[in-house]
Image: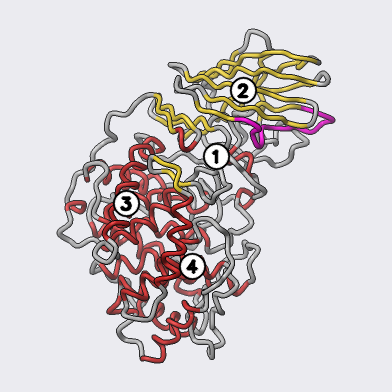
């Protein structure tokens, strides 16, 4: 796939190119899609429903903005009719259980609003009633108490916009819960007890908030204004996560959604806000999409695979199924913009002048920019129990140029995914930083954490940004003698370095298919330390590759 992403037609063509390969795989009722085998924890029917719905994130804005995609409008109109009809064998089921289909429902409802002439107005009164009843079946549903609260908000806002019965009580209740997650300076936490500050803040909280702001700017001007103001604050930080080549930093969960990470910028345009000049926003979006579509992320039929930089199912969370990657279609919300919008004729601009070191205290991290790419230095992130959580949240550094690696096994240092970690060896098993007992981002941009790889060892780590990388200062209290490896990036080329005056330098050749960008065996430079019993201190200097 090749696309310059300059004109509206270029963006429309990308949506068409992404959905056309799916066409042979719709079921007879056109309400489900089945083309892969990678399974989530949901039922097979729910997975097929998810796969059917997610392309609508791109198709509905395309139709709203005057684009065409053959007979897909008829496919999706029929599918929505059958999926919401309790008498149809293709019925998607009630939303009362708060499961995965509730997660997909706002996509259906927003599509009915955006592409009203294609998906809503041709329906009979009975078919419309089925849709309304389907949404109302979620009343009282128990679900994850995080960004999922937005789903019922958008569902009922869309019912309101369609002139149907809706619950203002549910809207108000859920918005009050969402408000409790706000942490200041544009940042939310994904739940009251959650410390994961990842892409869900961009493509969930702000994305949904900006849709609300657009749809409700006349009905609820105060809250709409608030959502826009917070998005502008957030943008001042989020821009640091992208580099000059268009890459974002691989970090956190749900990375198989790939370029969904730029959905935030698309939602800003949709809601009519400009945190940066339009040419700058166009540059971020277009460079990112050009970078992604050149990656080997499609199968031989042109369908998105599960993985990140290439097909890599082992890195995905348990909620990821074969259709999940099409969450990336959220990025095409901007296609709802009229042809006259300045975005379509703007010449993309480079990133503006940004600080070399940028502190994001609400997200417990510092961002460095050098050598043309971006590095995140996080602390205190809460990985949880999802697949490979601590490789996704617990490393000392994440880079837009050199993606992190997951673990194949913790019984082999070549396969433990130890890049940018201090790995402790005990009984042939390698332990890394997981949850932090204490953490802090200091005013001088140093990043502190207190953590324990296992009982009997406590580590206090201070990561200090430097002009060419960073310093890791470890203070360790240990109940015995152990071996530890302080590791740098996984690199294919021989560049970058990890230096210490008190340790033995070592190079670890990693196992293949662990790094999120590169499936090859990679060279990972490290310092080997002998950790004595009692208290000790070690300092490692990391020089970033050029």
Question: Which of the numbered marks, if any, corresponds to residue 301?
Answer: none
Q: Circle 1 is placed at which residue position?
A: 518
The answer to whether residue 426 is magenta is yes
Q: Is 310 located above or below residue 489 in the figure?
A: below
Q: Circle 4 — which element?
A: helix
| Residue for point 43% across, 60% down | 175
Task: Please name which of the two marks, 1 or 3, marks the residue nearer to the observer.
Answer: 3
Which quadrant holds the N terminus? bottom left
Choose between 278 and 94: the one closer to the eye.
94
Q: Write down the region rendered in magenta.
A: 425-438
Task: Please name which of the two marks, 2 or 4, marks the residue nearer to the observer.
Answer: 2
Are the two marked residues, 1 and 3, in contact with CB atoms closer than 8 angstroms?
no
Q: Circle 3 — which element?
A: helix
Choose between 326 and 532: the one closer to the eye.
532
Task: Please name which of the two marks, 4 or 3, marks the residue nearer to the observer.
Answer: 3
Q: Circle 2 — which element?
A: strand
Q: Circle 3 is placed at which residue position?
A: 226
- Residue farthest to the top? 501
Nearest to N terminus: mark 1 or mark 3: 3
Q: Circle 2 is placed at which residue position?
A: 461
Question: Which of the numbered marks, if any, corresponds to residue 104?
Answer: 4
Task: Please name which of the two marks, 2 or 1, marks the residue nearer to the observer.
Answer: 2
Mark 3 surroundings within 10 Å by alpha-carbon count, few (fewer than 14), some (14 through 19), many (20 or more):
some
Choose between 423 and 208: the one closer to the eye.
208
- Residue farthest to the left? 340
The answer to whether one can see residue 3 in this image is no
Nearest to N terminus: mark 2 or mark 4: 4
| Residue for point 52% across, 61% down | 324
Q: Is 123 located above or below residue 241 in the figure?
A: below
**Separation of marks 2 and 1 at Cα, in angstroms:** 29 Å
């Amino acid at each position: 796939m090749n696309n310059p992403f300059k004109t509206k037609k270029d963006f429309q063509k990308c949506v068409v190119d992404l959905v056309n390969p799916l066409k042979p795989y719709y079921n007879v009722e056109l309400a489900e899609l089945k083309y892969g085998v990678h399974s989530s924890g949901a039922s097979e029917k729910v997975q097929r429903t998810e796969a059917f719905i997610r392309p609508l994130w791109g198709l509905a804005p395309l139709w709203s903005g005057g684009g065409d995609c053959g007979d897909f409008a008829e496919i999706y109109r029929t599918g929505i009719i059958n999926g919401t009809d309790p008498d149809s064998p293709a019925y998607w089921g009630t939303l009362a259980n708060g499961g995965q289909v509730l997660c997909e429902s706002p996509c259906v409802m927003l599509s009915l609003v955006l592409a009203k002439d294609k998906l809503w107005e041709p329906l009979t009164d009975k078919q419309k009633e089925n849709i309304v009843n389907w949404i109302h079946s979620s009343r009282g549903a128990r679900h994850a108490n995080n960004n999922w609260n937005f789903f019922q908000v958008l569902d009922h806002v869309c019912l309101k916009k369609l002139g149907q019965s809706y619950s203002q009580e549910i809207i108000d209740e859920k918005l009050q819960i969402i408000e409790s997650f706000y942490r200041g300076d544009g940042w939310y936490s994904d739940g009251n007890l959650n410390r994961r500050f990842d892409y869900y803040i961009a493509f969930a909280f702000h994305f949904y908030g900006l849709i609300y702001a657009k749809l409700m700017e006349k009905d609820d001007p105060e809250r709409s204004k608030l959502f826009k103001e917070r998005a502008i604050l957030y943008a001042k930080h989020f821009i640091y996560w992208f580099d000059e080549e268009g890459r974002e930093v691989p970090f956190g969960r749900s990375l198989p959604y790939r370029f969904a990470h730029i959905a935030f910028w698309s939602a800003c345009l949709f809601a009519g806000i400009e945190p940066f000049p339009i040419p700058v926003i166009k540059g971020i979006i277009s460079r990112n999409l050009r970078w992604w579509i050149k990656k080997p992320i499609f199968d031989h039929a042109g369908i998105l695979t599960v993985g990140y930089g290439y097909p890599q199912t082992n890195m995905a969370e348990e909620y990821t199924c074969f259709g999940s990657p099409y969450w990336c279609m959220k990025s095409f919300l901007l296609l709802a913009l009229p042809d006259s919008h300045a975005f379509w004729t703007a010449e993309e601009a480079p990133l503006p002048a940004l600080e070399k070191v940028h502190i994001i205290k609400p997200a417990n991290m510092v961002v460095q920019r050098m050598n043309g790419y971006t590095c995140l230095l996080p602390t205190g992130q809460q990985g949880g129990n999802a697949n490979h959580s601590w490789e996704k949240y617990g490393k000392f550094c994440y880079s837009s140029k050199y993606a992190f690696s997951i673990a194949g096994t913790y019984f082999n240092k070549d396969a433990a995914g130890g890049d940018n970690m201090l790995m402790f060896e005990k009984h042939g098993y390698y332990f890394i930083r997981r949850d932090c007992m204490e953490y802090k981002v200091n005013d001088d941009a140093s990043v502190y954490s207190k953590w324990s790889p296992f009982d009997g060892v406590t580590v206090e780590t201070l990561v200090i940004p430097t002009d060419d990388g960073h310093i890791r200062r470890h203070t360790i209290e240990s109940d015995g003698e152990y071996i530890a490896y302080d590791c740098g990036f996984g690199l294919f080329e021989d560049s970058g370095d990890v230096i210490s005056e008190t340790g033995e330098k070592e190079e670890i050749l990693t196992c293949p298919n662990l790094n999120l960008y590169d499936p090859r065996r990679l060279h990972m430079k490290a310092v080997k330390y002998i950790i004595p019993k009692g208290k000790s201190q070690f300092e490692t200097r990391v020089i970033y590759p050029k």
